[in-house]
Amino acid sequence: MPVLDCSVKTCYYNEDNKCSLEGIKVEGRSADYSDDTACGSFKLRVGETMTNACGKEPTAALHVECSANKCVFNKSNKCHAEHIGIAGTTADRVDETECASFVNAEYK
Ligand code: SF4
């Protein structure tokens, strides 16, 4: 499972650059570049975080389902990178986030 570093501070699930979910879904079926991808699990935070609301501690490593098939780390729609970064510090919407660790196998 990839260790996740998430800079999307506006997400309900973000706590200290980690994610409170057990797994996330990264979108980008036809992605050629990082900014064509997005974290489909993003949920805009209005008020408190999930950690505050539910008491669930964020985890560093989690399951990542990913539809960005052109990425070198993608095997059968799962991410096999050791570490990934989700970017989008001021995101209000899913499409303002991205997987910064995407590497296009064709351009490698
Ligand atoms: S590194 Fe590649 S396979 Fe892993 S989540 Fe990002 S885009 Fe998907």
Image (cartoon, rainbow, N blue to C red):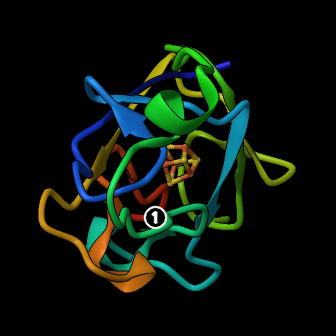
Residue farthest to the right, as pictured: 76
In this view, the residue in front, 105 or 77, is 77
- Type of residue at label 1? Glu
In the shown orientation, is residue 21 left or right of residue 8?
right
Image point (31%, 65%), residue name: 34
In the shown orientation, is residue 10 left or right of residue 61?
left
Q: How many marks?
A: 1
Q: Quadrant of the N terminus?
A: top right
Dividing the picture into quarters, in which one does residue 92 lie?
A: bottom left
Vertical comparison of 65 with 18: above or below? below
Name the residue tied to disc 1. Answer: 106
Q: Position of residue 76 (x, y in %)?
A: 87, 50
Q: Position of residue 69 (x, y in %)?
A: 67, 65
Q: Position of residue 39 (x, y in %)?
A: 50, 63
Q: Position of residue 57 (x, y in %)?
A: 55, 14
Residue farthest to the left, as pictured: 90
In the shown orientation, is residue 88 left or right of residue 24?
left
Vertical comparison of 94 with 101: above or below? below
Disc 1 within 8 angstroms of ligand 1 (CB): no
Image point (26%, 23%), residue name: 16
**Helix, strand or loop status at disc 1:** loop
